[in-house]
Image (cartoon, helix red, strand yellow):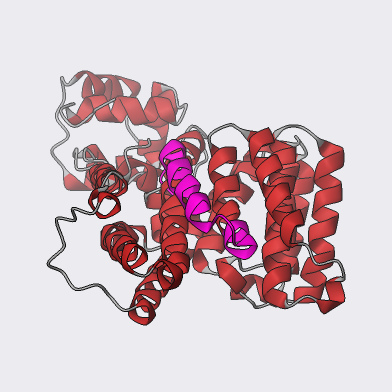
Amino acid sequence: MDRSDLPVGRRVAYWRARRRLSQQVFADRVGKSKSWVDKVERGVRALDKVSTLHEIAAVLRIDPAVLLGRDARPADVTTRAEGVERVRAALSAYETVVGVSGAAHLPRLPPERLAQEVAHAWTTFQHARYPQVVALVPGVLADAQRCHADVPGAGRAPLVEAYRIVAALLVKLGEAELGWLAADRAMAVAAGDPVLVAAAAVQLGQALRASGRARAAMSAALAAAYRIAPPVPDAAGPAELSLCGTLLAQAALAAARDGDEHSTADLLGEAAELAGRVGEGHDHHRTAFGPTAVDLARVAAALDLGDAGGAVGWHERTVRRDAWRWLPAEHRAAHLLDAARAYLAADDPAGAGRAVLDAERTAPAEVRHRPAARELLARLTRDPHAPARIVQLAAALGAA
């Protein structure tokens, strides 16, 4: 509902109803009569004193600017949509593939320079700077495609990584089907190299799960994991173990989404065993895999299996560890949104609100650019005791 053109009185009525306050209770809290409130809400009486506006806003736990109609523009929504279209256009460019590149006059980046460009895009993503990633990926994709066309051997891995970044970004922005396309392209370029296939399969599993294809996600992740699984774990390197363990965790999340509690437990157990061998504080193949990452996966899995209390318990134990702070900001903020969902499912909206605000402090774009976060905020603002900061944030994002 667009409330930008509503008079102030109507906005007061709207927020009073959202806070589940009767006119009499609201009148008592602002020190006015019920008749005064009724006249304000009907527009018969003007709210022309700044001090009164601030008193009303305080009772309603909103920013005074909301009453003045300055919350009408949903922040970042248009920017996000435009960004997705730019990424879609980059995925729709086939000039390099068919050999008639409109950018043929541009010099091809050397593979070493391209690897640095891709690494920068990954780092920006892991810092959850999604608007910057949106601005970067069209150029990164074009450079990677040109390099792969000219030197397929050296350009293969950077192109796979570029597609992985695009897939991860699109899933974040709620564009799972488009993310699936990017992940599928990563798989196609990676074909024949088990390690590159495994890396691409991480994003493929995410995209399939986000698009509601849990069984396909589980199948793809397991196939890639077992293809690179070392016959003797002690002989494998941490990078290989990280990829394998991440895929097992992805398969577990898909099993949980499908309601398969037994497979979820088994797969998380396998992932935890590999995580113990890898240890904490690593980020091989951009997986941030380790014991803490596996236990965060337990939170999302428990939630999907309907065990909200278990999810909250795993969350509260895991975030006390030092290793929690070593994870990329994107990973931590995304988990905090999962934790907020768990708190809501456990009938603890206050805990959910704290988790969302922690997510925003950790990585503001995780809350401001993810549709899943907007849905959470919309649910939280229905609580009459929602913190003022939650209400203000929801209003700023058009989620109230």
Q: Which corner quadrant of the image does residue 159 belong to?
A: bottom left
Q: Is residue 147 magenta?
A: no
Task: Give the quadrant of the N terminus.
Answer: top left
Is residue 276 placed above or below 3 in the rendered structure?
below
Is residue 163 placed above or below 37 in the rendered structure?
below
Q: What percent of the width, then of the height, locates residue 16? A: 38, 29
Q: What percent of the width, then of the height, locates residue 65? A: 23, 46
Q: Which residues are magenta?
A: 172-199
Q: Main secondary structure of the magenta part?
A: helix
Q: Does any portion of residue 214 appear in the rendered image?
A: yes
At 72% from the left and 76% from the top, the residue drawn is 238
Q: Does any portion of residue 54 appear in the rendered image?
A: no
Task: Give the quadrant of the C terminus.
Answer: top left
Left or right of 378 in this view: 151: left
Is residue 77 placed above or below 113 in the rendered structure?
above
Q: What percent of the width, then of the height, locates residue 267? A: 81, 50
At 75% from the left and 52% from the top, the residue drawn is 298
